[in-house]
Amino acid sequence: MSGGYLFYIAAAYGLCFAVLSAMTLSTVLAWKKAGKELDE
Amino acid sequence: MIASFANPRRFLKLARRVQPVAAAVAVAALAVGLYTSLVTSPDDYQQGSSVRIMYIHVPAAWMALFVYTTMAGAAFVGLVWKHIVAELYARAAAPLGAAFTFICLVTGSLWGKPMWGAWWVWDARLTSVLILFFLYLGYLALADAFDDEQKGINAGAFLLLIGAVNIPIIKFSVEWWNTLHQPASLTRLAKPAIDAAMLLPLLAMAVGFTALFMALVLVRLQTEIARRRLKIRRQGGGA
């Protein structure tokens, strides 16, 4: 990979996977919460 | 087939089987996508290594359009046939669609700065995708704006159907108007205009994003169904 655009590439991939991770985490937490409430 | 999944129990049975497979495909495809896009794919002769941003930007754009189209389709089915799972689908998919649209806009901006010299231009493609993002946010706000959940679902469904007019505008904006944004490099009818070494990371990411969306939307749908059951139980109607 040639230099020069490293900041833009790192920012794009970092942000993309941060959003995907947050999306996954919030989905799983909401599911666990709903499951717990349903079991009570 | 669609009608058979109006029964949430039948739907849940299928969702529990499909969801782990979709999650496994997502992890594998995203790992391949990351490796090929950041390590093995070559630099572009004009864009240099900034082309690597395209491997997440383009699949995110596809997902933004795909998710909205499925939501509008589900809204139609929900409004016409009162299909419970279809009604809940839009609520489950909207935050995911908004997230993909956000990724598309921000990664496009991060590519635009070094390539076009600007973070943002009021180009027809960019503007119509920004409108799509606002449609997602508007839907999320509207669907939660009523005390009566059904009213929110119905109002949101109308917004989704009206907003669907934006989908062909996004798709054909680069052909209808003189835009800075380049036209599609991949179409169903033509041979791909990009090299196989660049096509692989693009397709791997696209498969990864689609499988991740499928896995998450199935979990979110199960959450929505559980939430609805809880509400009925609290109102004294049984589970």
Image (cartoon, coloured by chain):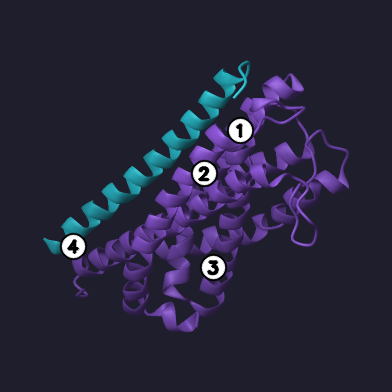
Q: CA distance from mark 1 to mark 3?
A: 32 Å
Q: To which quarter of the image does residue B233 belong?
A: bottom left
* Element on which disc 4 rests: helix
Q: To which quarter of the image does residue B129 belong?
A: top right
Disc 2 or 3, which lies upstream in sequence? 2
Q: Which residue is mark 4?
A: A38
Q: Which residue is mark 3?
A: B74
Q: Which chain is purple?
A: B
Label 4 Cα neighbours within 10 Å, binned few <14 / some 14-19 / many ≥20: some
Q: Amino acid at mark 4?
A: Leu
Mark 4 belongs to chain: A
Q: CA distance from mark 2 to mark 3?
A: 30 Å
Both marks 4 and 1 on one chain: no
Q: Is residue B32 above or below residue B159?
A: above
Q: Which residue is mark 1?
A: B53
Q: CA distance from mark 1 to mark 2?
A: 12 Å
- Quadrant containing the N terminus of chain A is top right
Label 1 Cα neighbours within 10 Å, binned few <14 / some 14-19 / many ≥20: many
Q: Which residue is mark 2?
A: B33
Q: Amino acid at mark 1?
A: Ile
Label 3 Cα neighbours within 10 Å, binned few <14 / some 14-19 / many ≥20: many
